[in-house]
Amino acid sequence: MSSSRTATASPSPIHARTLRTPEELVEAGFVTRDTLPAIADVAEQYATAIPPAFRDLIETPDDPIGVQVIPSPEELVAAPHELADPIGDDALSPVPGIVHRYADRALLKPLLICPLYCRFCFRREHVGPDGGLLDEEALAVAFNWLRDNAAIREVILTGGDPLMLSPRRLEHIMRELASIPHVTTLRIHSRVPLAAPEKITDALLDAMDADKAVWLVVHANHAREFSPAGREALKKIQRRGIPVLGQSVLLRGVNDSEEALEGLFRAMVESRMKPYYLHQLDPAPGTARFHVPIEEGRRLLAGLRGRVTGLAWPTYVLDIPGGYGKVPLGPDYLEPSLSAVSDPNGQKHTIRTPDTL
């Protein structure tokens, strides 16, 4: 589907709320009525949510914003290489809500609710509006596990989206984590500032404050996500002294061109957000339509070297399926001989060092 929706002079009731059901998607003009049975089948397995601020960015259902959040019947077709738990979260969870993959840090997933549900999400088998909220008992177990593991220096709040918690709940979690002596850094992963900027209230900002280093990593995949309201939400966070990083997924039909990546990374830097990671797509079920081959990703980034500031340069990474961790994918400029490098134009240069003379 590629036709634009007709603009209305004033918001209708459906325009003012998050779209969740197949019927609402039809009413919004995002799917056609003849596809409704297939979209209903998708809804039986995977959640949908398109909040008003994100909906306003969609010009056509198949544009770089729409394809991220509008369900497709293709999601029910799993490719042979796809996995229900592609990065091994379940196998690396010592207690509910905790994932421990690296020696000095751990994930805490206090909920599995998001402001929107990405159609390419690697946790799509788990996230949704009805599940995953850790109760007080489960949270206490998670906090005790973190206290008992003195090697943990950083706790990463993820989910779901931690900024979907109530301010009181988030404040409680932040205070408990900050009280653990060996934890020095708290990191929050979220799409809320750009997807639902109205949720960045003073109360939520107060809750994010803690007596430890706090970092926010915002997920964004296209420059158009940086709306005026989203940029203002980021400024509110930054005024509280919280540094902001950006992470993205390389996605077919969203950012699979040098121009799209350049626009995305420049939008981040202009918003005082440092591009941190560009992720290779994780092989979650039904996500093959978004796949960009690694070699193509390397070429895209190589095309930006020397064209954009180093401030706008993320690390292109693969999360090795099975829970074996992230590794950088390049591009590489050092020749296998270790005695020459290529410049951004592809010209080779000999390295002259005491080791090569």
Image (cartoon, helix red, strand yellow):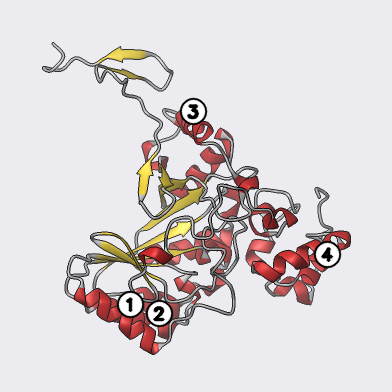
Instruction: State the mark number for residue 174.
Output: 1
| Badge 2: residue crowd in 10 Å (few <14, some 14–19, many ≥20) | many
Res 87 → quadrant: bottom left
Q: Earlier in the sequence, mark 3 or mark 1?
A: 1
Q: Classify mark 4: helix, strand or loop.
A: helix
Residue to which mark 2 is pinned: 170
Res 48 → quadrant: bottom right
User: What's the residue type where badge 1 is placed?
Assistant: Met
Disc 2 to disc 4: CB gap under 8 Å: no
User: What's the residue type where badge 4 is placed?
Assistant: Leu
Q: Classify mark 3: helix, strand or loop.
A: helix
Disc 2 to disc 1: CB gap under 8 Å: yes
Instruction: State the mark number for residue 36.
Output: 4
Residue 29 appears at what percent x and percent y? 82, 61
Residue 160 in the figure: left or right of residue 329: right
Q: Earlier in the sequence, mark 2 or mark 4?
A: 4
- Give the foreground label among 3 and 4: 4
Image quarter in which the C terminus is found: top left
User: What's the residue type where badge 3 is placed?
Assistant: Gly
Residue to which mark 3 is pinned: 303
Q: Residue furthest toward the top?
A: 357
Instruction: For marks 2 and 4, give the CA distance.
Output: 38 Å
